[in-house]
Image (cartoon, rainbow, N blue to C red):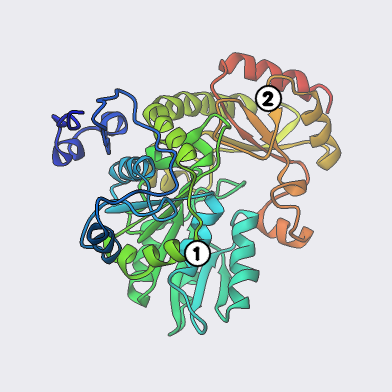
Amino acid sequence: MSEAPAEKLTAAEIAELRPDTRLVHGGILRSPFAETSEALFLTQGYVYDTAEQAEARFKGDDPGFIYTRYSNPTTAMFEARLALLEGAEVARATASGMAAVTSAMLCQLKAGDHVVAARALFGSCRYVVEELLPRFGVTTTLVDGTDLSAWQAAVTPETRVFFLESPTNPMLELVDIAAVATIARAAGARLVVDNVFATPMLQSPIALGADIVVYSATKHIDGQGRCLAGVILCSQQFLTDHLQTFLRQTGPSVSPFNAWVMLKGLETLPLRVERSQASATALADRLAGEAKIGKVIYPYRADHPQHALAKRQMRGGGTLVTFEVDGGKAGAFRFLNELKVVRISNNLGDAKSLVTHPATTTHQRFTPEARAEMGISDGMVRLSVGLEHVDDLTDDIRRALKAV
C-alpha cells in the first residue's frame, strides 16, 4: 500500500484561510487510501511494531496513538478543525457538553480554591457550581453577570476561576467578556466561557480574553439532532498542566463515531448558522408585533438592553429568540401544544425549529424566586430557530397564538 498523499495546503496556509474554508479543509489526516471524506476510525486500541515502540509511545517520545480513551485519529481531526476556527492552540473533545464544563472546571481546582460564576447559567452548570464543587472543598460565589463591579467585589485571594455563558440560557442576557477577562486576569484567575448560544461563527471568546472556551457540540456543531459531544478549547500550557492528565485518567472521552459526525457537521456550520440566524432575526421582528406576546428578546434588536454590547461583541444576533406569551404557564402551554411545524424539545441549535418552556424543563429545579431573579417567568418560551422557511414558521406561530 502506498503512503498517504501529501496535503497541498500546509497548516499555516489553512490558518490564513477564511473560516468557511477552514471548516472544510482543516485538520485532515488522510490514510493511504486517499479518501475524500475523513475516515472513521472505530478502534479501541492500536498495535506497535516492537516493544520498544510501545515504550516510547507511553513515555511520549513517539507521537502515535495509544488508546482511544486518550486520543483517536478521527477525534483528533475534529479537535484540530474546531481549534482552527476558534483561534485556540488546542482542543479536546468530550462525551457531552456537560462533560466539557465539568472537566474544564475540576481539572484546575482543588480544595480551598474559589470560583466566581455568573448567576444566569444553564441548570446543569449551576449544579456544578453550586452543589458539585463545594463537595470537594471549592467555595463559589454567584454574581449578576452584567454587573462588572459584582465580579470585582467577589474576588478573594483564593479565586482561581471565573465562569460565564453569553448569551445566557434562556434570557439571552449578555456578559461583557472582554471586561470580565480583564478582571479575572488581574485577580490571577482563568476565565471559562460557555459559548454555545453564540456558536464559534458569531463570537470568539479567546480573542476577547477568555482562557478556556467550552461547547456542547451536540447543539449547532452537530446541528441535526444525532449525537452528543462536548469540546474544551484552551492553550497548550493549560492542556499540559491541567487538562490532559485529567481527561486521560477520568475518561470523559467522546466516541469516534460521534466525533466523525461533529467533524462533518463543521463543514456546513457557517451555512446553517447563517440561515437560522436570518430567520431568527426576521421572527423576532414579527413576534414583536403580535398582540398576545408581551416581550421579545433578541440580542440584535435595538430594544435589547445590551444591544450595543451585542453589536460590539458578536457578529450576529444568533439563532434563538425568547419571548413571553400572555396567560402565564397556562397560556404558554396552550401555545406550545398548538404548534405543528415547531416541535417541543429541550434541545437547540438543530435543523428543526424547537421550542421549550424553561420554567418547567431546563430551569425547573430552581425555586420560583431564583427563576424570577433570572427573569424567567411562567409565560416565557425559548425558540431555537431551524432551517425551515421563515414564513412557514411565522404562520405556525401565529396560528398557535390563537389558542392563547
Q: Farthest residue in the right direction?
A: 330
Residue drawn at 58 percent across, 78 percent down = 136
| Disc 2, SS | loop
Q: Residues within 10 Å of mark 1 (few under 14, many from 20)?
A: few
Q: Is residue 249 above or below residue 46?
A: below
Q: Residues within 10 Å of mark 2 (few under 14, many from 20)?
A: many
Residue 84 lies left or right of residue 306; in this view the side is left
Q: Label 1 belongs to which residue? A: 250
Front position in the image: 297 or 350: 350
Residue 321 lies left or right of residue 71; in this view the side is right
| Disc 1, SS | helix
Q: Amino acid at mark 1?
A: Thr
Identify the disc placed on residue 175.
none
Give residue 318's position: percent from left, percent from top.
Answer: 48, 36
Q: Are marks 2 and 1 in contact (CB under 8 Å)?
A: no
- For the question of whether residue 230 can be seen, the reply is yes
Identify the disc placed on residue 342.
2
Residue drawn at 55 percent across, 50 percent down = 168
